[in-house]
Image (cartoon, helix red, strand yellow):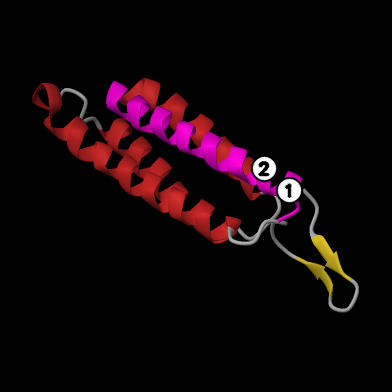
Amino acid sequence: MRAMTNSATGPTPGHKVKGFNGIASGVLACEAISLLLVLTVILQVSDQQYWTKLNWILVTVVGVAHFVAIFFQKFDWSIKLNIGLQVVALIVGFFVHWSMVGVVIVFIGVWGFVLYLHSLLLKRGQ
């Protein structure tokens, strides 16, 4: 997606759909909180069998990466970043615990719906 161009003011950064940055930021914030709550699950389940240093570091890094990605939503490449975060979170989830995979699958569905609505708005021309 290329930046919009206004002949009077020059290129406008961001997405062509107004408000998409806010929606994407909100979804990322909810997902980051949900992923960090996975830490409580892996701490309590199976007598702390899954509470290894590698597991809690992986979950924390993925959750914090989602928070950091919020600040990049104004760029055109942010949709690719968001999809990449989903792939990374899913792969990490397979190594950590199935509950993380469940959270990521739910948010993949949310992102699918958000991107579907985004494409409809692009077709409609706002």
| Residue 22 x, y percent position in the rendering | 52, 60
Callout 1 environment at 10 Å: few (<14), some (14 to 19), or many (20+)?
Answer: few
Residue at the far bottom in the pictured view: 8
Quadrant location, the C terminus: bottom right
Which residues fall within the magenta stretch? 97-126
- Magenta stretch, overall SS: helix
Using the image, determine if residue 123 lies above or below residue 26. Answer: above
Give the alpha-carbon distance from disc 1 to disc 2, as whole Å: 6 Å
Callout 2 environment at 10 Å: few (<14), some (14 to 19), or many (20+)?
Answer: few
Quadrant of the image occupied by residue 42: top left
Using the image, determine if residue 6 lies above or below residue 121. Answer: below
Per the image, is 101 magenta? yes
Looking at the image, residue 39 sits to the left or right of residue 61; the answer is left
Identity of the amino acid at label 1? Arg
The label shown at residue 120 is 2
Residue at the far front in the pictured view: 124
Q: Residue at x 32, y 32 (%)?
A: 54
Looking at the image, residue 77 sits to the left or right of residue 109; the answer is right
Q: Residue at x 46, y 25 (%)?
A: 91
Foreground: 40 or 56?
A: 40
> How many numbered dots are placed on residues in this image?
2
Q: Residue at x 85, y 65 (%)?
A: 5
The label shown at residue 101 is none
Per the image, is 53 magenta? no
Q: For mark 1, what is the residue?
A: 124
**Disc 2, SS:** helix
Residue at the far left in the pictured view: 47
